[in-house]
Amino acid sequence: MAGWLRGTVKEVVSGDTVVICGAVKSGPPPEKRLTLSSVIAPKLAKRDGSTKDEPFAWASREFLRQKIIGQQVVFKTDYVVEQIGNREFGSIFLEKENVACSLVAAGLAKVRASGTQQSPYIESLRKAEEHAQLAGLGLWTKDADALANSVRSVPFDGSFSASAFLQAAGGKGTVITGVVEAVANGGMLRITTLPDYQQAIVVSECRVSYDHCTGMCECNRSQVSHASTLRQAVPVALCGELCQGMLLMMQVLCGVQAPSMGRKVAPATASESEATPSPAMPSAASIAGSSNAEPFAREAKQLTEARALNREVRLVLEGVDKYENLFATVYVPPMPTPAGTANGASAGPEGSHVNGSNGAAHSQDSLAELLVKVGYAKCVEWSLGLMTSGSNRLRDLEKAAKAERRGMWTNWVPPVTNQNKLSDTFHGKVVEVVSGDCLVIKDMTSGVERRVQLSSLRAPRMGTRERGPDPWATDAKEFLRKKLIGREVDVKMEYTRKVPITGPDAGPGNEERLLSFGNVELAADSKGGEEAQNVAEMVVARGFANVIKHRMDEERSSVYEKLVECEELAKNAKRGVFSTKEPAANRMNDVSAPGNAQKQGGSLCTEAPRHCAAPTRAKQYLSFLQRGGRMQGIVEFVLSGHRLKVTIPKEGVTIVFAPSGIKTPSRAQPAQHGKPAVQGEPFADEAVSFTRELALQHDCEVMVETMDRGGTFLGSISILPTHPQAKPVSLALALLRAGLARLQPNVDPFRLPDGAEMVALQKAARDARLKIWQNWTPEMERAETGEDEEDSALGTNGNGAAGHRQLEVAVTEVVDASEFYVQRVHEPRVQWVAEQMQAVAAASPPPIPPELRVGQLCCAQFSLDKQWYRAYVEKTMPLSSQYQVYFIDFGNKEVVSDKCVRQMEPALAAVPPQALQCCLAYLKVPSAGVEYANEARALLTQLLGGGQPLTATVISKEKPGTKDNAKHPRWANNKLAVTLVEPNSQGDVAVELLCAGLARLPKLTRVKDPLAKQAIQDLSPYEEEAREARRGLYTYGDPGDSEDEEKPAPKAAAWGKPR
C-alpha cells in the first residue's frame, strides 16, 4: 500500500465513506473515495425509495461531515477489497485525531468484527466502542423512542409542489439554511434543509424540537395538520427529502445559468444492479456523468463543488417558474485559512478553493457571483427579475468578465449600442422638476445646472403645445415638486442614451439628443429627522412611473431590483398609472397668454414678456384676486428676473405676476411679431438664474394690489421655505439685496409694505457695487431710467423718493391748496425760451390764423401781460374760433382766440415743460369744493403768489399720469412733494397753514417712513395750537373725528345699494 498522503475532504458520502481530492496547479484535481478501515456505519436510504435509513445513519453522516468537510487531512490506504469493486479502505487523521475512533466513540459506527484485513488501529477502535456501549451512546442506546426518531421516513410519492412549498415557507425572500448533498452542474444543487427551516414553514399548531446531541428533529405528529406535505421527496430542480423536519430538494441558482453537463448516463438495469453491488449513495462525481458537456461546464461544476458540496449554506427563496422549478440565491461559507495550506491545499480556478463550513453567516459569498465573476455562468434576464437583491451586482460582474474575456466570454464580441456608461457623482440642489422622471439639478460645486433623467424609469409624458399631458403626468410632476424642489440631493450618474429628436424641434436630418440618466437620492435632513430616500423608488412605489424592461446588454439603474419590487407593490395596490380610475382633472384657467390657455412643456417661457399676458382676460380676475388677500400659489415659470407665472389653486387661475416697485435687467428678445430683436441688458441672465433657484416651482404667498396695462398683476410675493424652521423670503428684497434689481423711478417705495427696507437694501447694494451697480454713476442712472434734467437738479435717486435736496424755486400758479406749480430760479432753459418767445412776439402775425388740433404745441398770448408763451391745446372751440390752452412753463390755463395763437418752431417744442407740479409734503388740505378749500387756496396764494424765490426741499416724487392723459405736458415731470421756506425769514409755508387751521397732519400710525414720522412730530405743536384756538377747520371741533378717510371702509349693505 502507498504511504501517507495529504488531501482535502471534498464530500462525505456516508458515516464511513468520504471523497478526498489532491492538490494540483491547474485542471481538475485527482479524487480518491476512501472507506474507514474496520468501521461500519449505518446505511442511508436510497433515493429511489427501495431502502430506508438504518438507525442513526443520518446522525453518523452529519457527525463526520461537520468534522472534516473541507478540512485538510492525512490519510493512508490500508487495504483494498476486490470483491466489491476494488473499494479502498484506510485511516484518516485530522491533525492528530483519528477520525474513525471519534466516530466510534460517539456511538455512530461499529467496529467490523470479521475479516482478514484490519485497521492498524483496531485496538483503539475496540476501546472506543466499549466506552460508547457503556455510555449507551448512539447505536448503543436502550431508549426505544430515540431509536425510532433516529430513522428518517422519506416517502417518494412525487406529489411535491414547488409553489405550495414556497408559499408554506413564507413566500419570496424567505431565508433558510441547508446542506448541499450533490452538484448536478454549476447552477443546480441538491440540498437538504436543516431543522431551523422547519420552524419557518410549520404552522403554530406544530411543536418542533431539535436534539443537539443527536442532530435529530422531533415533531408532535398529532398536532401537524399537513405533516405529510412536509415529508415529501422532491425530484424537482433543487428537490429533496424531509426527515422529520428536514427536506431534500433540488435548487436552481437564481439569476444565472451555468453550462450544461449534458445528459445523464442511463441507470443500470435490475440484473446489473444485482450482479454488481453498489454503494448506499453515489458520490457527487457520479451524479452527472456527461456525454456532451458544454464548454466550461466541468469548470463550473468543479467550482461549485469546491465551494458548496456538503457545506452548510444559506438560501434566499426567490420564486418558482412555470415548470415548478424552485429558484433561490445560495450563499456559501467563505474560504478558510487553515494552518499548513501551503502543503497540499486544493486549488482550482479563481475562487474555487475548497473551504470549510465554519464561516460566519454575515461573510458568506454568493455562489452565483462566484460563477459569474470567473465567466462560468451568464446572467438570465427573466431569472434576475425574481431576485430580491443583488441583480445589479451580477450584471456588473458579468460586464467585467466580458471585458476581461474570462471563461465562456473568451471570444465574446461586444454588440453595437447607443448607450455609454457614466460614473461621476455630485451633490446638488433640485431647481426644477420637468416631469415625473426628469429633474434639473444644480451642482453645488460647479454651480452648473444639469438635466438628469431617472434611470430605468418612464413616467407619463408632460404636455406640449401640440398635445395635452398624458394621464397622471401632472400628478407625477406635482409629487416630485412637493418632495424635491429646493432640496439637496446626491446624484450618481449611470449612463447616457441617444434618442431621436421628434416634434417641432426636429431638424431636417436624423438629429439625436443625448440624455443623461442617473440615480438620485434625497439627502438626509438632519433638522427634520428624515432619512435618505431614493427618488426613483418613491415615484415607482406611488404608481407614477413604469420600470423599463431592459435588454441584457443595456445599462440600468443600480437599484433596478428594488424598482421592480416597488412596481409590483404599486400594481398590487392599483396606484397611479396602474389604477383603474381616471386621474382628477386639472382645470386651470391660464390668463398668462393671449387667447386660450397656453400649453407649455418646457421649463422656461420662450416668448417675449411683452406677449406673455392677456390684459383683457386677466382684468376679469383683478377684483377677485384683490379681495383674496394673501393667497397660496405655485411659481410655474420664470419669465424674467422679476416676472413670474404663478398658479393660484384656490382661484383656479394662472397669472403673470411681478413684485411692485422693482425692475430687473431686461433679457434679450428675438425678432418676432414684426418687431426687431432686442439686446439684453447686463446681468439679465444672472437675475433669471437667481430667481429660478429661489422661486421656480416653489410654494409662495401672493397679494395682488393692481395690474399694469400689459396684464401683469402687481403686488407682493414671498417664497415659502422648504424647511418648517425657515422664514418666507420676499422676492423683491432678495433681488435688491443681491444687486440684481432696482426700484422703479415712478413708484414711491414708502407706499409699499417694505418700502423703507427696499430703499436701504438698494443703497447697500449700490454702495457695494454689486452686479448691476458695478459701474454705476448718477449720470448712468438718469440715462437708464429716463430721468430728465429736472430730476437731476432735484437730486433724486431714481426710485420715486427724493434725496431731500434743496432747490431754489418761484411759484408760478396756485391751482388749489393741494396743487401748485413752480419754476426753478436761474434755469438756463427758462431764459432761453423767454428770449425765443420775444422773437415770436416781434414777428408779424400770419395772415390766416392757424388751425390747431387737440394735443398740439403752439405759442399763445397771455391776456394779462400780452406776452407770448409756449402752450398746449387742450380743447378746440370751432364755433367761437377759440382754443383752451395750457401754458406748459407756468401751469396755468386760459381760453384764447385763434388770433392769439401761432405755430411753434421744432426747436422750441424740443425743450421739455419747465413748470413743475408740486404739493406740500406731510399736509392734508381741503380738496376743491369742500369747506375751507377757498380759504386755504387764498392763504397759499398770499404766501406764494408774490413771485419771491423760495427754498424747496423735495421729500418725494410721483408720476401721477394715467392712460388717458399720459401725453399731457403737465405729466411730463414728476409731481413733487416739497416743503417751502422763505430764505430770509425762514418762514415755513406748512407752519402758516397749520397755524391758520387750514391744514392737518396725518396720523402717525399710518406713516411708515421714520423720517416722515419725525417731521410730522415736529409740526404737530402748530396743529395743536390751531385746534386749541378753534381756527379754521377746528372752529366747530376736530374734523378728524368724523372724517371718512380716518375710519375703516363701510361694509356693503346686506340688501345691496338703495334704489
Image (tube, rainbow, N blue to C red):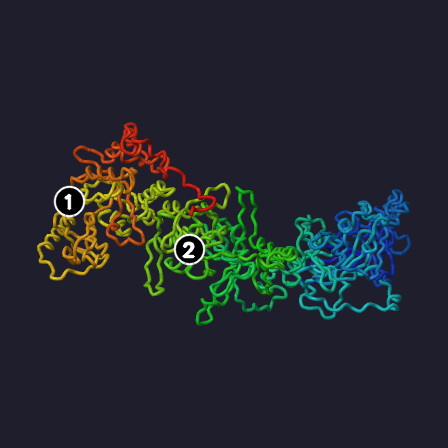
Amino acid type of the residue that numbered disc 2 sits on in the rendered structure = Ala
Drawn side of residue 373 relative to residue 148, left or right: left
Give neighbour class at mark 1: few <14, some 14-19, many 20+ (Cα, 10 Å).
Answer: few
Drawn side of residue 539 relative to residue 428, left or right: right
Residue 1046 x %, y %: 37, 37
Amino acid type of the residue that numbered disc 1 sits on in the rendered structure = His
Query: What SS does tag 1 mark?
Result: loop
Compared to residue 1001, the image places residue 681 above or below, namely below
Q: Are marks 2 and 1 in contact (CB under 8 Å)?
A: no
Drawn side of residue 521 relative to residue 116, left or right: left
Question: What residue sits right under mark 1 in the picture?
Answer: 826
Drawn side of residue 744 relative to residue 345, left or right: left
First in sequence: mark 2 vs mark 1: 2
Instruction: Kindly indicate the quadrant of the structure image that contains residue 328.
Output: bottom right
Instruction: Kindly indicate the quadrant of the structure image that contains residue 1049.
Output: top left
Q: Quadrant of the N terminus?
A: bottom right
Query: What SS does tag 2 mark?
Result: helix
| Residue occupying image coordinates x 37% and y 39% | 1044
Give neighbour class at mark 2: few <14, some 14-19, many 20+ (Cα, 10 Å).
Answer: many
- Determine the CA span between mark 2 and mark 1: 49 Å
| Residue occupying image coordinates x 26% and y 54% | 967
